[in-house]
Amino acid sequence: MFTIDTRSRTPIYEQLMEKLKELIIREVMKEDEQLPSVRVLAQQLTINPNTIQKAYRELEHQGYIYSIPGKGSFVSPVKNEINKERMEMLRKELERIVGEILYLGVPKDEVIKLIETMEEPERREDKND
């Protein structure tokens, strides 16, 4: 599925969260698809099951997945309405990052050009696979 860099300064649970978010956003993992069990993923990645459980809990808190006791964790259906709390958090993070870039002396028009050249994540259109 993916690999974790154990030498990275980024905590393992955060790396795991980011990899799973990417799979969900790019619709590699479809809504209501079951995620690997904590035990299976721990064996595959050779990391502590508590680390995986922490990543799953945080992803559930952020709305990317949901859990059914005794069944496992699943990809949350895409919501048509924007999750306002999540959007506010991302807006603040973007303000922090752009503020730091501007502080480092990058002109505002270059920041705007950078944003304009960014591409939206690819989404798979064939939902009936």
Image (cartoon, rainbow, N blue to C red):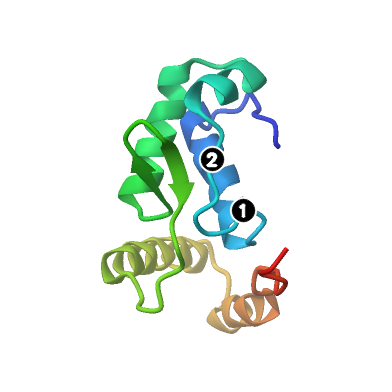
In the rendered structure, the answer to whether residue 67 lies left or right of residue 2 reads left
Q: x, y (%) of residue 79?
A: 40, 71
Residue 29 disc label? 1
Residue at image coords 69%, 74%: 119
Residue at image coords 52%, 59%: 31
Amino acid, disc 2: Leu
In the rendered image, the residue lying farthest to the left is 85
Q: x, y (%) of residue 12?
A: 52, 28
Residue 82 disc label? none
Amino acid, disc 1: Met
Q: Which one is nearer the viewer's eye here, 35 or 90?
A: 35
Q: Is residue 13 above or below residue 126?
A: above
In the rendered structure, the answer to whether residue 115 lies left or right of residue 92 reads right
Whether residue 19 appears in this view of the structure is yes
Q: Is residue 47 above or below residue 86?
A: above
Element under disc 2: loop
Quarter of the C terminus within the rendering: bottom right
Q: x, y (%) of residue 111?
A: 58, 76
Quarter of the N terminus within the rendering: top right
Query: On the image, which quarter does residue 115 sit in?
Result: bottom right
C-alpha span from label 2 to label 1: 8 Å
Sequence-earlier tag: 2 or 1: 1
Residue 35 disc label? 2
Whether residue 11 appears in this view of the structure is no
Residue at image coords 52%, 64%: 101
**Mark 2 and 1 residues: CB-CB less than 8 Å, in contact?**
yes
Q: Residues within 10 Å of mark 2 (few under 14, many from 20)?
A: some
Q: Which one is nearer the viewer's eye here, 111 or 34?
A: 34
Element under disc 1: loop
Q: Residues within 10 Å of mark 1 (few under 14, many from 20)?
A: some
Q: Which one is nearer the viewer's eye here, 46 or 100?
A: 46
Q: x, y (%) of residue 122?
A: 70, 69
